[in-house]
Amino acid sequence: MRVATYNVHGFVGTDGVRSVARVGDVLADLDADVIALQEVDAPGRAEEDGPLFELATRLGMTPLAGPTIAGPSRMYGNALLTRWPIARVQRHDISVSGREPRGMLEAWLRPPGGGASLRTLVTHLGLGLRERRRQIEALSDALATFTDVPTVVMGDFNEWRPRGLTLLRMNDAMGRAPKARSWPSRFPLFALDRIWVRPRRAIRGIWAVRTPLSRSASDHLPLCLGLDRERLRPPW
């Protein structure tokens, strides 16, 4: 089993060219079962037309939009692509007044073979320190529920400091996460993109995908994490 997170930068690459097809090529190479996306800029109703629908159709996945900015002709924000059936969806508003709207997309997925659902949370935290503190409180509150359910949290956490409060709070809630540098894509120096898994013992490895294509498709590299399906099952 494999999950991934990718900030697609509005589908605009490091060369300044907007290309949904190029991002699709990157996603196809990941061969992930579940993909979290951030900065998805989609005209229209994102799940029914536009770039997200285009990607889902190409990859044979189900799209789920979690817009933070929504209007009659545009949706922008988080999204999820999944090969697995979706059992439950909730969209959380974690915006801070005066800052860019932010959200958290929650989906309960049913992996093949039965067993427990996989609770999946996708987010993109703000740039400001105080803003992130407020948002991580909301995320921590969500993670304090359903603690007996296998859970994956993915996204762009915008935390530059190795021991920043955002990471410390997440590690307290989910266990210490492995990391890989994913930004900037041309020469990655910072692990802004993160994946946490509960139970942590289910993690098989994490890696940023560094290819000529992924270095040009967005300013972030995609981050992949392997999961041991059997270790997701209770008892933990």
Image (cartoon, grey):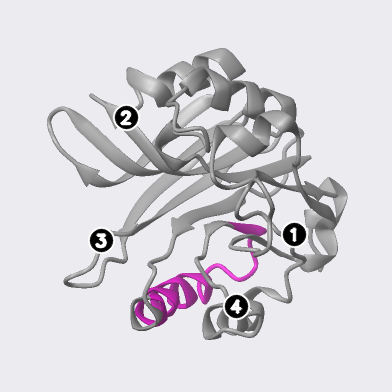
Residue identifier under label 3? 100
Q: Do the residues labelled 1 and 4 touch (CB within 8 Å)?
A: no
**Location of residue 99 by image quarter:** bottom left
- How much space separates mark 3 and mark 1, taking CA atoms? 26 Å
Report which residue position mark 4 lands on: 167
Proximity of marks 2 and 3: CB atoms separated by less than 8 Å: no
Q: Which amino acid does label 1 sit on?
A: Ala
Residue type at mark 3?
A: Glu
Query: Horizontal and vertical percent for residue 42?
Result: 32, 29
Q: Residue 42 carries which label?
A: 2
Label 3–label 4 contact, CB within 8 A: no
- Classify 10 Å Cα crowding around label 2: few (below 14), some (14-19), many (20 and above): many
Work out whether 82 lies above or below 120: above
- Residue 148 among magenta residues: yes
- Image quadrant holding the C terminus, namely bottom right
Residue at 47 percent across and 22 percent down: it is: 20
Label 1 CA crowd tier, 10 Å (few <14, some 14–19, many 20+): many
Instruction: Tell me which numbered mark, 3 or 1, is placed earlier along the sequence.
Output: 3
Q: Real-space Cα distance between discs 4 and 2?
A: 30 Å
Q: Nearer the viewer, residue 105 or 231?
A: 105
